[in-house]
Amino acid sequence: DTEVTQTPKHLVMGMTNKKSLKCEQHMGHRAMYWYKQKAKKPPELMFVYSYEKLSINESVPSRFSPECPNSSLLNLHLHALQPEDSALYLCASSQARNSPYEQYFGPGTRLTVT
Amino acid sequence: GIQVEQSPPDLILQEGANSTLRCNFSDSVNNLQWFHQNPWGQLINLFYIPSGTKQNGRLSATTVATERYSLLYISSSQTTDSGVYFCAVNNAGGTSYGKLTFGQGTILTVHP
């Protein structure tokens, strides 16, 4: 089973709201990733967790706060977002962080900030 | 950082036609993946191919790592092949282990 699940599928939030995105995998993978994809652009890496520890933060604003409570779960906490943060947020996982390991992506959460 | 260029940016085909998509990259890689992104945004893994040749049904891919390019072949295209095709790489020897850098994608439209 190579499935990564994400909830919710769609999210609309105001600029003063706090919300969370959730990602889950049961493949025994020890690396998990958040990517952001704007319309008509390729995905861009935001964060990498390796063995539940944050190992890469691609200079993401602090209004995005990742959390990895255990090896199967990855959350992205959102607070005081801006309309330009509207995008598709993709979660991925792989066996480990060090290449070469294939990454598998979830279906994404489509976020709209009003 | 590593640069990834895909060509062509757009491709329009009639059902049944064959096509070749290209991915050039600027540095050595230890991970190269081809994805198909469907209209709902799901990235579907097509190939994990840092080197060599693989085939899966009507699709095949070849990566020539020494010359820094990869090709994705689609034969007998179907309307369900429509979508965006991405090439993504991880830079061997770089410090951002695990980071996939994506090309800009090829938008494929297959007409019945």
Image: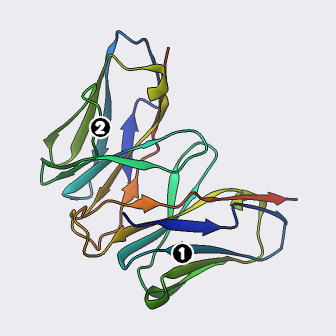
Front residue of B73/A113: it is A113
Secondary structure at badge 1 equals strand
* A69 is higher (above) or lower (below) than A17: below
Give the quadrant of residue B8: bottom right
* A69 is higher (above) or lower (below) than A20: below
* B9 is higher (above) or lower (below) than A99: above
Residue A92 x %, y %: 35, 52
- The residue at the point 36 percent across, 61 percent down is A103
Look at label 2 and name its amino acid: Val
Q: How is the image coloured?
A: rainbow
* Inter-mark Cα distance, 2 to 1: 28 Å
Give the quadrant of residue B20: bottom right
Mark identifier at residue B16 = none
Q: Quadrant of the C terminus of chain B?
A: bottom right
Q: Which residue is mark 2?
A: A60
Q: Which residue is mark 1?
A: B24
Image mark 1: chain: B
Residue A28 x %, y %: 21, 58
